Image (cartoon, rainbow, N blue to C red):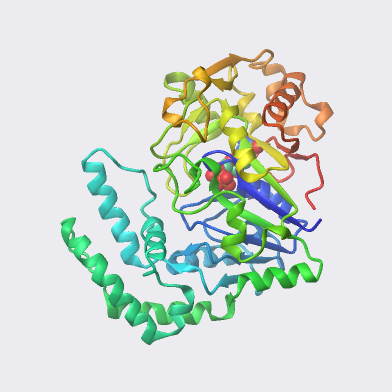
Amino acid sequence: MSTLVVVGAQWGDEGKGKVTDVLAAQAQVVARFAGGNNAGHTLVVEGKKIVTHLVPSGCTYPGTACVLGAGMVIDPEVFQDEVATLRKQGLLPGDELRVSLDAHVIFPFHRELDGVREDAQAASGKAIGTTRRGIGPAYEAKAARRGIKIRDLFEPEALRERLVRAASVLDPEFARLGSEVRVQIEANLEAAKAWAQWLRPMVCDAGEVIAEALQRKERVLFEGAQGAMLDLDHGTYPYVTSSPTTAGGVCTGLGVGPTVIDEVWGITKAYTTRVGAGPFPTKLDGDAAHRLREAGGEYGATTGRPRDVGWLDLPALRYAARLNGMTGLCVTKLDVLAMLPEVQICRRYRDGVKPGVDRLEAAVPELERLEGWGDASWAAGLSEIRRLEDLPAPVRAYLDLVAEAVEVPIALVSLGPDRDQTIVLRAPF
Ligand code: GDP
């Protein structure tokens, strides 16, 4: 076995950064297939916090190739800053970074359009809750076949034409929304020259990089962004992200065939969180929400926005398992759940409401209170445990319940933010 896909199984922020970082220790290539800098991973290595937005989580291992796929949208300014910060921390010492020539570029006007639109939507009470980073407008341009790819940065004449085309569509929209912003063709051409020079050593055909690695019998970890319920096709549309977040996206986003995928592990928190608008059946309010949010530090890594929080939603997780063809489940933040005075779980929704068939807005959870939680005698020491059999009985019962309901075996358990606060139950490769 030489490839593993790691994806979020909820609404993002499941702890993919930490889990991917742990698993990347055994990989020679870590490749990201979709999304942009709307994602934010937090890695803790020897107590040091490392935040990444675009760079794959393999960046903590010198020599591990970090591939950014064609399915991604890349803001070169953000990318440059992120790489500079990581290099200051002693990471990415060599030629680890590889960027697909077919990835799309986020220009400053995409960011500006995102903000202007979100303000206009907010004024009418209909904000989607985007991160205002230009991700949506860049994907929209891609689908409309007027996007600008990394490869265009190397061809100034072609780029000028693409920018003129962008201006012809976006300038009237800026004007209509009452904004003075316009697509600055010369300034963008100038900026693109510098980006191209910086990117030149990294650009590649990402699919070829992966195919060659597999030929050399290297191990490849495919890393997703956000979570299954935010998938553009299968999530809680329109409150979703602008790209695929499920395992199928690996193939389209990196240029590899489905037959190269050996394993798919989905990551779920021991509870649920969500940022932005849209349905969230098991959402908590009031004191209970406050307690869980504070215990878990549930504020966005990219935006600092407080996340909505709630109990683990097994129907949604089961749906995510099917969407991804999941072969293993990674459960994170059990230590956070243990800090709460009581724990509940949702096994089903009332009236047979079913994700994928019914709108999740209609889902009313049937909640069940679980025995044995809220016990300070074991809660505080949970992060120190390193063997499944040493976990307190309620925690083991919880993992069994989840695996049985979702029909996917538990592959990894995370008991704290640090790398070593992890129990790996199955070989990832
Ligand atoms: P990602 O985008 O899926 O990587 O998720 P985020 O980075 O936004 O959120 C995960 C946060 O939880 C990070 O701050 C991690 O350091 C932290 N984290 C991950 N796993 C655990 C865990 O098992 N316990 C605790 N307490 N924190 C964790």
Identify the residue shown where x is 82% and y is 33%: 387
Residue placed most toward the observer, 343 or 121: 121
Identify the residue shown where x is 73% and y is 41%: 328
* On screen, residue 185 above or below 108: below
Identify the residue shown where x is 72% and y is 21%: 378
Question: Is 104 left, or right, of 379 in this rendering?
Answer: left
Residue 96 appears in the picture as rendered = no
**Quadrant of residue 268 in the image?**
top right
In the rendered image, the quadrant that contains the N terminus is bottom right
Query: Residue 264 location, x and y as percent?
Result: 70, 48
**Quadrant of residue 276 in the image?**
top left
Query: Residue 266 location, x and y as percent?
Result: 65, 42
Residue placed most toward the observer, 190 or 361: 361
Question: Is 372 left, or right, of 294 in this rendering?
Answer: right
Query: Residue 237 location, x and y as percent?
Result: 42, 42
* On screen, residue 306 above or below 56: above
Question: Is 87 left, or right, of 382 in this rendering?
Answer: left
Quadrant location, ligand no. 1: top right
Question: Is 220 left, or right, of 243 in this rendering?
Answer: right
Query: Residue 217 location, x and y as percent?
Result: 81, 66
Identify the residue shown where x is 52% and y is 77%: 199
**What is the count of numbered marks?**
0
Question: Farthest front residue?
Answer: 357
* On screen, residue 340 above or below 78: above
Residue 21 appears in the picture as rendered = yes
* On screen, residue 36 above or below 404: below
